[in-house]
Image (spheres, coloured by chain):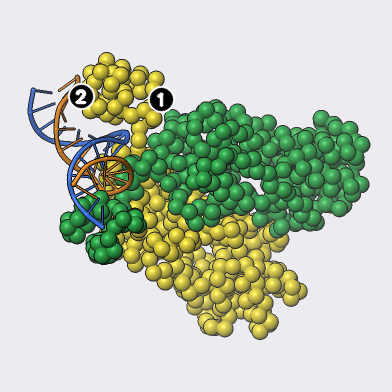
Chain colours: A yellow, B green, C orange, D blue
DNA sequence: TTGAAAGCGCTAACAA
DNA sequence: TTGTTAGCGCTTTCAA
């Protein structure tokens, strides 16, 4: 493999000059530069980014820590769309993405920060980490430039991008209440998700606005999983015959809920309106198609990458960015 | 940031000894090792993988070149599932994944091989590259250990994993023909996809087996896109009223085709049977649910990672691995 | 405009 | 069992 040493030899100059010529420094003779560039091309030279990173002490890589990249959770295209946004922004920069799998056994031995430190990534994007994740604090304690997705935590080196979950959930519940539903239940995600807390607040807030009491027994956690939501909905509907509206904190769970309703011969939306959250690709295609709160997953990724790169390049302070949601009316609600 | 130098100082030994102790070499005194390990922990030491890679001339990273990681193509979860398989295998190894975006403008300046060479990746997995991609040859000409997904090309440093597209397509067409369909059309992908050729062959082969002639005018390319398939199906059905079966080379296209049929008030499957290819998550949920040929996308990724790692670690020869497909009977075919 | 020299953090002969 | 030395490929002072 060709190195600048080889080029220097061929060109009869020092490695310093080669380095300068190839990196576009101005203080090098035009002819020398041309000569060097030609030789480099001839020799099919590729700079060794490892060597460069080592001396410059920056790797031009960004670490991506995602959970939810498992076989099962591929279905709700959430993580992918986020990644697609990140990827698209980064593709216009000098940074490459290095993917760390947080579900691996490797991860259990090496903490997130260890992984990042070893690879000397310049910054990190985190998505899908739970509130009780033991390593979350570690990341905060480190001094890695970080952007969290959907984790409203920040410090001098940590920013986040999220959507307005509280408003979104409120919109969802309000949509049902506006249309005359009186007994609106909720299938939430799980205790350890930041967004779940916020969405619960939104739901409560809507109830309050419509002068309805919050009833504990109408809220269940579905763990963001279709099957679990199906089970919970089943028991919810069996126990509370008067439920006429159901807000699910994810589309996948809403799909599970729809299945439960069908099984109980409850007509959607005539007897029960169901509204989801996320607007995943599936939502449009299920039958009846799913009314939902759309969040811009691509933008979530795109913005987090943008923020991180800005922190790295322009030394800007981390921000707290909140994206808005949108109600998408389809067939599953009256 | 702590280095082995610091540790060496603290421990009163040479850096060599530290290196050996930390890397688990046997020729180091137990007490010295313990001492060094303790100091390392105390100082919160993290090895610098860049330095190590530089000297060892291997980076323990695998490059992933995917196309189809754009905002639009997220819908058919194909790429994601493949990535999930790759990721899952690699998470049990020492390798990390570095993601190169092939749709970027950066890519136009730097070829795939350049990206890989600069980052000194140990091997590469390629997916979604077209036959006419100018860089494909370059990869072949290089000496990077490579595994292609769905590109049946191999050499002494290139293996591939694919599914039996010919058989799969044949199964699809045969499924329609067996059930009495006489005029079976096909919406294929595009000219530049390896799999499209093979699937066309499978389709022809089934026709032949059932003693039916191949009719050029019954085959159109839908570019693997829902919208395009919708358009093509529309014109196909308008021109050929006798079509009673349709084989689409991807589920997404089949979904587009279903929409076209609905628009023309053609009943599925009573008047027209439609069969897809891939078995993406959507397939089960559309209405009527889509009969399709399932390919194991996760396995595609998993196996390619497995092969590559085996090539890297055990210096095994690249293989040609072909996975089988499975007919999934649902409601869209009689 | 160019080069010599030092060094980024690590590994690996080789010698002791 | 340990240390000395050289070197991976590059950038960056500093001096010429």
- Seen in the picture, residue A57 relative to B208 is either above or below; the reply is below
Q: Is residue B71 left or right of residue A94?
A: right
- Seen in the picture, residue B124 relative to B8 is either above or below; the reply is above
Nearest-to-viewer mark from 1 and 2:
1
The answer to whether residue A155 is visible is: no
Question: Which type of secondary structure does the marked residue at label 2 adopt?
Answer: loop
Q: Which residue is mark 2?
A: A27
N-terminal of the two: label 1 or label 2? 2
Residue B289 in the image: x percent, y percent? 75, 56
User: Which residue is painted at 64% across and 57% down in the image?
Assistant: A282
- Seen in the picture, residue B187 relative to B39 is either above or below; the reply is above
Foreground: A93 or A284?
A93
Residue A248 in the image: x percent, y percent? 58, 69
Q: Which residue is mark 1?
A: A44
Residue B44 location, quadrant: bottom left
Q: Quadrant of the N terminus of chain A?
A: top left
Q: Chain of mark 2?
A: A
């Amino acid at each position: 493999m060709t190195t600048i040493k080889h080029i220097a030899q061929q060109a009869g100059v020092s490695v310093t000059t080669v380095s300068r010529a190839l990196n576009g420094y101005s203080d090098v003779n035009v002819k020398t530069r041309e000569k060097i560039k030609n030789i480099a091309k001839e020799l099919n030279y590729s700079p060794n980014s490892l060597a460069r990173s080592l001396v410059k002490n920056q790797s031009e890589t960004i670490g991506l820590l995602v959970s939810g990249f498992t076989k099962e959770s591929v279905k709700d295209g959430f993580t992918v769309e986020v990644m697609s946004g990140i990827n698209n922004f980064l593709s216009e920069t000098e940074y490459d993405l290095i993917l760390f799998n947080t579900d691996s056994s490797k991860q259990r031995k090496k903490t997130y920060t260890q992984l990042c430190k070893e690879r000397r990534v310049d910054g990190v994007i985190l998505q899908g980490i739970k509130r009780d994740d033991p390593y979350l604090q570690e990341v905060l304690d480190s001094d890695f430039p970080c952007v969290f997705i959907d984790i409203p935590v920040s410090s001098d080196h940590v920013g986040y991008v999220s959507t307005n979950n509280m408003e979104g959930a409120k919109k969802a519940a309000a949509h049902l209440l506006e249309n005359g539903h009186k007994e609106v239940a909720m299938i939430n995600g799980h205790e350890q998700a930041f967004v779940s807390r916020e969405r619960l607040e939104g739901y409560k807030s809507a109830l309050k606005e419509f002068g309805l009491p919050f009833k504990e027994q109408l809220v269940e956690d579905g763990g963001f999983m279709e099957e679990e939501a199906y089970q919970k909905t089943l028991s919810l509907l069996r126990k509370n015959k008067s439920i006429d509206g159901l807000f699910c904190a994810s589309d996948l769970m809403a799909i599970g809920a729809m299945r439960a309703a069908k099984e109980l011969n409850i007509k959607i939306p005539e007897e029960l309106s169901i509204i989801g959250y996320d607007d995943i690709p599936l939502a449009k295609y299920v039958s009846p198609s799913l009314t939902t709160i759309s969040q811009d997953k691509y933008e979530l990724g795109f913005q987090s990458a943008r923020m991180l790169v800005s922190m790295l390049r322009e030394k800007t302070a981390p921000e707290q960015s909140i994206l808005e949601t949108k109600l998408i009316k389809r067939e599953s609600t009256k």
